[in-house]
Amino acid sequence: MRRLQGQWALVTGASSGIGKDIAEILGELGCDLVLTARRTDRLDALAKTVSERFGVEAVVIPLDLAQPGAPATLYEKTTSRGIAVDILVNNAGYGVHGFFLDIPWDRTGDMLQLLVTNLTHLTHLYARKMVERDRGHVLQVSSIGAFQPVPGFASYAAAKAYVLDFGVALNHELRKSQVTCTVLCPGITITEFQQVAGHEELTAFERMLAMNSREVARAAVAAMLKGKAMIVPGRINALNGWMTRILPKPVAAAVAYLTLGPPRDIGG
Ligand SMILES: NC(=O)c1ccc[n+]([C@@H]2O[C@H](COP(=O)([O-])OP(=O)(O)OC[C@H]3O[C@@H](n4cnc5c(N)ncnc54)[C@H](OP(=O)(O)O)[C@@H]3O)[C@@H](O)[C@H]2O)c1
């Protein structure tokens, strides 16, 4: 992969899972890093590791990105340090698993603020500056859940469908510039996601498809540096995603429900 010395990448959700692996890979390529998420101790540990191992600068900005003002705060904190972000990785996220009406509204509302509104706002803030400099990459983290309605992850999958369509459309809008936007659609990836979503017990089918976050992150960074519109890591995931997209949506929803199993009642 191309070396990235002298460039800055901002990675959201860098304290764990796919975001942490993407940050490490970008650090290994020589990129300086802005790391953000809520857990400062994890971010500090990652910043220390990447700067010691790869000799890059790593700045930690702890933030709750589900708060409405968070994108503006983050933008202000990076620009006031004189950091021009060349790579924006919109990765922070979580899912809520359950029947939509059983999930307390605040959990769903915060998730949508994080996955939809704040992701879009961060893109608006940073990609405009990239276009002014006529260089840069945006990596939007969606999901293969974006390809079909998913009962049990209804609002999460719909939010990821937004991220997919938004990112691919933006890639097209940017085609005459040197700025690219790539959408990553991971399948099941072993991270803290399952625990946070309350979906720890994977079905046999899910276990068969599961990937580790390092391979997903490698595929994502490679696709982003090539300026691809989207990437689905793993051949079976890609095939599965392709088949899902050609099914009528009600059929695809029924298949997703059978595959995932019924959500447990989380109350509220
Ligand atoms: N794992 C999968 O199977 C899978 C499949 C498809 C798509 N994805 C997507 O991949 C992305 C990364 O998830 P992951 O699998 O790596 O899960 P993960 O290990 O749980 O990591 C999620 C990251 O998002 C951060 N985050 C969550 N809420 C946040 C908030 N309010 N403010 C700031 N940061 C927040 C977390 O940091 P803090 O908790 O420290 O804030 C953490 O760094 C997500 O967008 C997820 O939807 C995952």
Image (spheres, rainbow, N blue to C red):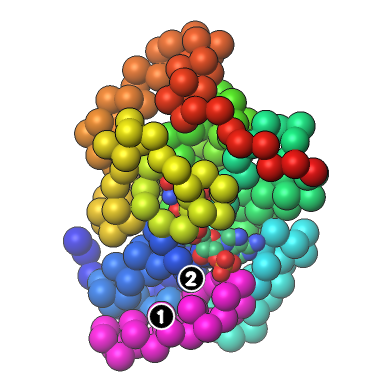
The extreme left residue here reads 1
Q: CA distance from mark 2 to mark 1?
A: 8 Å
Residue at image coords 77%, 59%: 68
Question: What residue is rendered at 49% in x and 79% in y?
Answer: 43
Q: Is residue 24 magenta?
A: no
Label 2 secondary element: loop
Circle number at residue 46? 1
Chain part drawn in magenta: 34-62
Q: Residues within 10 Å of mark 2 (few under 14, many from 20)?
A: many
Residue 213: image location, x then y, percent: 33, 56
For label 2, the residue is: 15
Side of 238 relative to 89 (left or right)? left
User: What residue type is disc 1 on?
Assistant: Leu
Q: Nearer the viewer, residue 186 or 9?
A: 186
Q: Is residue 175 above or below residue 22?
A: above
Disc with the residue nearer the chain's start (2 vs 1): 2
Q: Tell me the quarter of the picture where residue 158 sits.
A: top right
Residue 149 occupies quadrant: top right
Position of residue 61 measured from the top left corner of the image (x, y, whole percent): 59, 79
Residues at discs 2 and 1 in contact (Cβ within 8 Å): yes
Task: Decide if residue 183 is in sight here.
Answer: no
Quadrant where the image shows the C terminus:
top right
Residue at 75% in and 41% down: 267
